[in-house]
Amino acid sequence: MTFLFANFPLVLALITGFIVSWITIPPIVKISREKKLVALPNGRTSHSGAVPALGGVAIFSATMLGTSLFLRNGTDGEFMYVFAGLLIIFGIGLKDDLISLSWSKKFLAEAIAALLVVGIADIRITTFHGMMGIGTLPVWFSIVFSVLVFLFLINAFNLLDGIDGLASGMGIFISLVFGIWLDALGLFNYSVLAFSLAGGLMAFYGFNVFGKKLKLFMGDSGSLLLGFIFSILSIKILCCEIAPANVHFMRAFPTVIMSVMIIPMIDTIRVSTLRILKGQSPFHADRTHLHHIFLRLGFSHLQASLTIILMNAALFVMCYFLRDLNPLLLAFILFPTALALSLIPCYLAKCIKVEKEEPHMEAALKH
């Protein structure tokens, strides 16, 4: 309650984002159905029926309006470039939702948006805070590495959007954690961005998970937007120089930041590695993601998404309590733990598949 009263503008940004998203979704669904702008089931999707996939329009509108209304004037001049980058990402995502683009064209647009924010707004990773013995980074390396982080996280959240409630639910958790953290560090305007996004996602979550006649997906216009915004927010936090005497100081600062988004990150690394080992493109579409595995184990969409979000939250809480460890040591704890948690369902699904196949093999041998 203290946070709510002390940060009323942030609460208003969240409420504004929620209201904007809530009132724009019904007309979006109606127009999408009339114009047949819907996602149809195919061999790798997990839904049935034609579902509108333009939820990103509502999320983008909510985030932009909520942020614009509550920004503090005269600070954070880089926001003009942040908004420009958001427009590029939203535009390419929307175009892909409407006419389906190749991954190379999307990748190029993502790189341009990232370069705009990293190269001009100067929102980039400038230090590793002593992790692996690395402090301040050379400018050229900082720019290249930061753009790669943008590209990785944008596509990680794009790949996360596979079942109802997963990308939006994970997005709500991440944006609230980052929003509170950014406000504590004095980065108010970026906290407003996070809370506006959280509000828009909350309204979308209701329609996406519990909607019947008004059900819709966020599409690439929403999922790409999440990855882009979370790249910005995480880099802004990482670039804060906090004195050891400060109450917000964490020795394992970089690792704790990664833990907020660890499951989307580790699942993207796992799946991409498997595809490369098979001689496929890392962008090859299949059903090997963690959420697909949970569905194969008999989980509903809601059960699978909540389980994955809780796994992510548990790993963040673990890292937060271990925040005073050496950052590299904590990373060696975090990543193997996250990988193990993601591999256990894969192993169980493989066992179930073998059990189902064995009776058929025995019957075939008898004949």
Image (spheres, grey):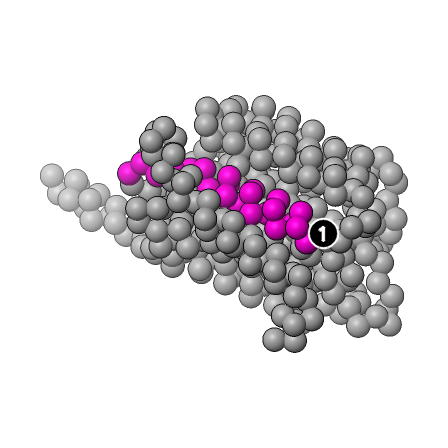
**Which residue matches tag 1?**
71
**Quarter of the picture holding the N terminus:** bottom right
Dot 1: what SS? loop
Residue 365 shows in this picture: yes
What secondary structure is the magenta-colored segment mainly? helix
Label 1 crowd (10 A; few <14 / some 14-19 / many >=20):
many
Range of magenta residues:
49-71
**Quarter of the picture holding the C terminus:** top left
Residue 61 lies in the magenta stretch? yes
Residue 308 lies in the magenta stretch? no
Q: Residue at x 80, y 34 (%)?
A: 119
Say above or below: 193 vs 40: below
Expressed as whole percent of the image width and height from the top left, the position of residue 342 reads 50, 54
Among the 4 quarters of the image, the one containing residue 225: top right
Q: Residue at x 77, y 62 (%)?
A: 185
In the image: residue 43, left or right of residue 157:
left
Say how many tags the image has: 1
* Residue sitting at the far bottom: 2
* Residue sitting at the far left: 367
Which residue is more in the foreground, 3 or 365?
A: 3
Which residue is more in the foreground, 237 or 283?
A: 237
In the image: residue 232, left or right of residue 205:
right
Among the 4 quarters of the image, the one containing residue 184: bottom right
Expressed as whole percent of the image width and height from the top left, the position of residue 88 reads 63, 31
Which residue is more in the foreground, 183 or 312?
A: 183
Residue 343 shows in this picture: no
Say above or below: 30 vs 16: above
Q: Residue at x 15, y 44 (%)?
A: 363
Q: Mark 1: which amino acid?
A: Leu
Expressed as whole percent of the image width and height from the top left, the position of residue 132 reads 80, 53
Q: Residue at x 76, y 57 (%)?
A: 187
